[in-house]
Amino acid sequence: MIKVSIAILSYNRKADLNETLTEIYKSQLNNVELEVIVADNASSDNTVDMIKNNFPNVIIIETEKNEGVKAYNSAFKKASGKYILILDDDSFPELNSIQRMVEEFEKDDKIGILALDVRNYYNYKDVSKSIEKNSLKDKKTAKYLMGFNGAGAGFRKALFNKIGGYPEEFFLYWNEMDLAIRVLEAGYNIVEFPDIISFHKFAPTNRTSTRGPFYYTRNLYWIIWKFFPFNQMIIKTTQLIFNSIYHSFEQNSLIYIKATLSAFININKIKRQKVKPSILNKLRISTKLAFIIFK
């Protein structure tokens, strides 16, 4: 019997989390045991009471305040499974995906993170019909990636013990990329299989319009300063400063300038880490993306 720990971060999405937990327990498993851990970031909508009443077997970690991705690390530490499945409170795996994830992990000990193919929840019926017709089940060729989506990803617990989890100083955004770079630097692969799927409720508009552009921009500075060699760091930092100023005027908002100032003021929170040039050369990190997606 192989244990999989499912780590979910929740914050004021009681109804979504209820659906997520319901779907998780529908999973079709063979010789796989589930341990479900919810790290609740001080929700004010009675999320914890809902879990206790509806899912008494779920392990709950309650924070005193919203800690961002730091709460994920608390769940990772608590996990006793060989593998950890990372989910959002509004995402859940397809019925066979946990079983398939375990099968692929067991075949290849160089898989550090298995990225689920994250699909739009609102296309759930279409994807489910496609799976039932076996249009995906025969496509089991691994696709090697440089990153992953935190709405569905498998992670070796032993690797977490070795390199740690999400960067707690980030709070929100770019935490997946930070972890991905460290996984690759440790000599492991990030892979995706088209038949290992999770469904995520993609928001039509950004749910955190104020915090989103701030953390996305600030943490991009930190990603650049943390991993890139000095010459690339200077170039990308210059580009990011220019874009922050330009788009602050364009969008009549000071949020990007505030993010830039915060990055510099709190630069002591990050530590430089050496990364192989072959890894960095494959990364596609745009210094313009934040100013487009939050526009």
Image (cartoon, rainbow, N blue to C red):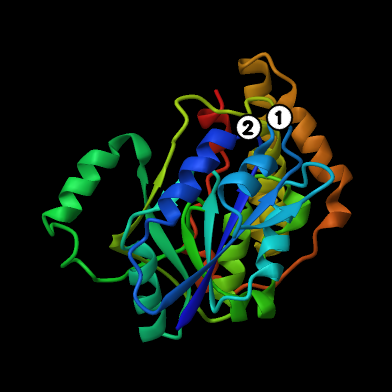
What percent of the width, then of the height, locates residue 167?
72, 59
- 270 vs 94, nearest the viewer: 94
Q: Assess disc 1: are there few (<14), some (14-19) or many (≥20) residues with their C-alpha within 10 Å of its C-alpha.
A: many
Residues at marks 1 and 2, CA–CA distance in whole angstroms: 9 Å
Please tell me whether mark 2 sits on a helix, a strand or a loop.
helix
Which amino acid type corresponds to the residue marked 2 in the rendered image?
Asn
Q: Is residue 282 left or right of residue 57?
A: left
Q: Residue at x 50, y 24 (%)?
A: 205
Q: Residue at x 64, y 74 (%)?
A: 160
Q: Assess disc 2: are there few (<14), some (14-19) or many (≥20) residues with their C-alpha within 10 Å of its C-alpha.
A: some
Please tell me whether mark 1 sits on a helix, a strand or a loop.
helix
Q: Is residue 185 left or right of residue 166?
A: left
Which amino acid type corresponds to the residue marked 1 in the rendered image?
Tyr
The reply to whether dot 1 and dot 2 touch (C-beta < 8 Å) is: yes
Which disc number belongs to residue 256? Answer: 1
The relative height of residue 205 versus residue 118 in the rendered view (above or below) is: above
What percent of the width, then of the height, locates residue 122?
33, 34
In the rendered image, which quarter contains the N terminus? Answer: bottom left
In the rendered image, which quarter contains the C terminus? Answer: top right
Q: Earlier in the sequence, mark 1 or mark 2?
A: 2
- Counting every numbered tag in the picture gives 2
**Corner quadrant of residue 227:** bottom right
- 265 vs 94, nearest the viewer: 94
What percent of the width, then of the height, locates residue 247?
62, 24
Query: Residue tagged by mark 2?
Result: 243
